[in-house]
Image: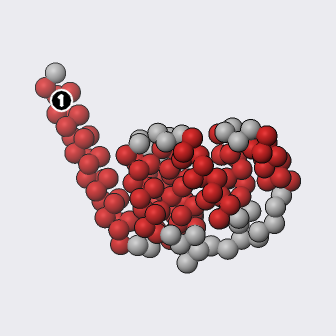
């Protein structure tokens, strides 16, 4: 179920909106605006910003992580999983945060989440054991 928050635009949001209106491709300002929208409960607006950032920074794992959060907050679970998987493939590695991030509560309830985390865990353990074997051989 999508989370609901106060949907009032703050000074911070208005500030970043003006910045982005003047510099539409200012990625850092867009990122701050997206975070402010989300904190303010403006999840649809946050999603729009995250989609813009994904076009500007298609290889940034954090951009896709934030996109996953936006989709999850809106209850768009399939899209959230797709974005989360892409963030991981691009190099996102803060798995402990994935397990506690409130923005991802909706996808953590889905059975696919546990499968994804198990897959990541098994690959991590396999890579770690291969690395241990390689260092022992040297």
Query: Residue 65 location, x and y as percent?
Result: 51, 52
Q: Secondary structure at mark 1?
A: helix
**Residue at the (66%, 39%) spot, across then down:** 25
Q: Which residue is mark 1?
A: 134
**Residue at the (41%, 41%) spot, across then down:** 91
Quarter-wise, where is residue 7 in the image?
A: bottom right
Name, please, the residue furthest toward the bottom: 1
**Residue at the (42%, 62%) spot, across then down:** 81
Name, please, the residue furthest toward the top: 138
Query: Residue 137 location, x and y as percent?
Result: 13, 26
Q: Is residue 7 visible?
A: yes
For the N terminus, which image quadrant?
Answer: bottom right
Query: Residue 77 location, x and y as percent?
Result: 46, 69
Vertical arrangement, residue 22 with respect to residue 123, above or below: above
Q: Is residue 93 visible?
A: no
Vertical arrangement, residue 113 with respect to residue 52, above or below: below
User: In the rendered view, does 16 fall on the left or right side of 114?
Assistant: right
User: In the rendered view, does 12 fall on the left or right side of 137?
Assistant: right
- Name the foreground residue: 58 vs 119: 58
User: In the rendered view, does 38 fall on the left or right side of 130?
Assistant: right
Q: How is the image coloured?
A: secondary structure
**Residue at the (78%, 49%) spot, across then down:** 17
Query: Residue 30 location, x and y as percent?
Result: 68, 45
- Name the foreground residue: 56 vs 33: 56
For the C terminus, which image quadrant?
Answer: top left
User: In the rendered view, does 124 fall on the left or right side of 25?
Assistant: left
């Amino acid at each position: 179920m999508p989370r609901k928050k106060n949907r009032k635009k703050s000074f911070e949001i208005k500030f970043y909106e003006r910045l982005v209106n003047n510099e539409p491709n200012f990625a850092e300002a867009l990122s701050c605006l997206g975070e402010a929208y989300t904190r303010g409960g403006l999840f649809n607006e946050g999603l729009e910003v995250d989609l813009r950032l994904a076009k500007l920074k298609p290889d940034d794992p954090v951009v896709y992580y934030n996109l996953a959060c936006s989709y999850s907050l809106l209850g768009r679970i399939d899209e959230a999983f797709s974005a989360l998987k892409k963030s991981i493939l691009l190099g996102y590695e803060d798995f402990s945060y994935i397990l506690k991030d409130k923005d991802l509560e909706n996808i953590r309830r889905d059975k696919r989440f546990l499968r994804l985390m198990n897959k990541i865990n098994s690959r991590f353990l396999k890579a770690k054991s291969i690395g241990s074997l390689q260092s022992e051989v040297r």
